[in-house]
Amino acid sequence: MSTSAGCPILIVEDDPDLRYMMVQMLALEGFEPEGASDGFEALKRLRSPGPRPHVIVLDMMMPRMDGWEFCRVRALDPDIGQIPVVVLSAAPRNILDIDAAAVISKPFDYDTLLEAVRREC
């Protein structure tokens, strides 16, 4: 059995097709992925009762609440601030100030994403 079996993941991505594809592909690998369309939705899910994800896959450029603001809010919340974040971004803004377990440029290679998620699970 894969070490990824049962590992919950939250994918925060505003592009519905890309989010769906990542959820489906990671589910096929044995993870338990769930999607959120932006930082607001992600925070709502993270603060709701139930199991927390072991890793957050985070797009940086999103409407309403982008990845930078999500990371600022997340860092202030001790209940969710320690969950590792894998950043996916084509963003021109500096992402070095983000406390990320991994940073993957878009367009991304699926195997690179899979490797980063596996390291955190």
Image: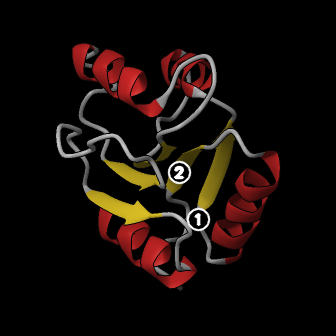
Element class at badge 1: loop
- Left or right of 32, for residue 87: left
Q: Nearer the viewer, residue 40 or 52?
A: 40
Tell me which residue sits at (25%, 48%) in the image. Answer: 100
- Give the vertical position of 48 relative to 32 (above or below): above
As shown in the figure, which amino acid type bears the numbered disc 1? Phe
Query: Quadrant location of residue 102?
Result: bottom left
Colour scheme used in the picture? secondary structure
Mark on residue 31?
Answer: 1
Tell me which residue sits at (17%, 37%) in the image. Answer: 97
Q: Where, quadrant-wise, is the C terminus in this rendering? A: bottom left
Question: Of marks 1 and 2, which one's residue comes earlier in the chain?
Answer: 2
Q: Residue furthest front?
A: 92
Tell me which residue sits at (63%, 24%) in the image. Answer: 63
Q: Nearer the viewer, residue 6 or 18?
A: 18
Q: Nearer the viewer, residue 106 or 79?
A: 106
Residue 79 point in image, percent of width and height: 31, 21
Are the residues tagged 1 and 2 within 8 Å (C-beta)?
Answer: yes
Whether residue 66 is visible to the viewer of this picture, yes or no, is: yes
Few, some or many residues within 10 Å of mark 2 (<14, 14–19, 20+): many
Query: Which residue bears the numbered disc 2?
Result: 9
As shown in the figure, which amino acid type bears the numbered disc 2? Ile
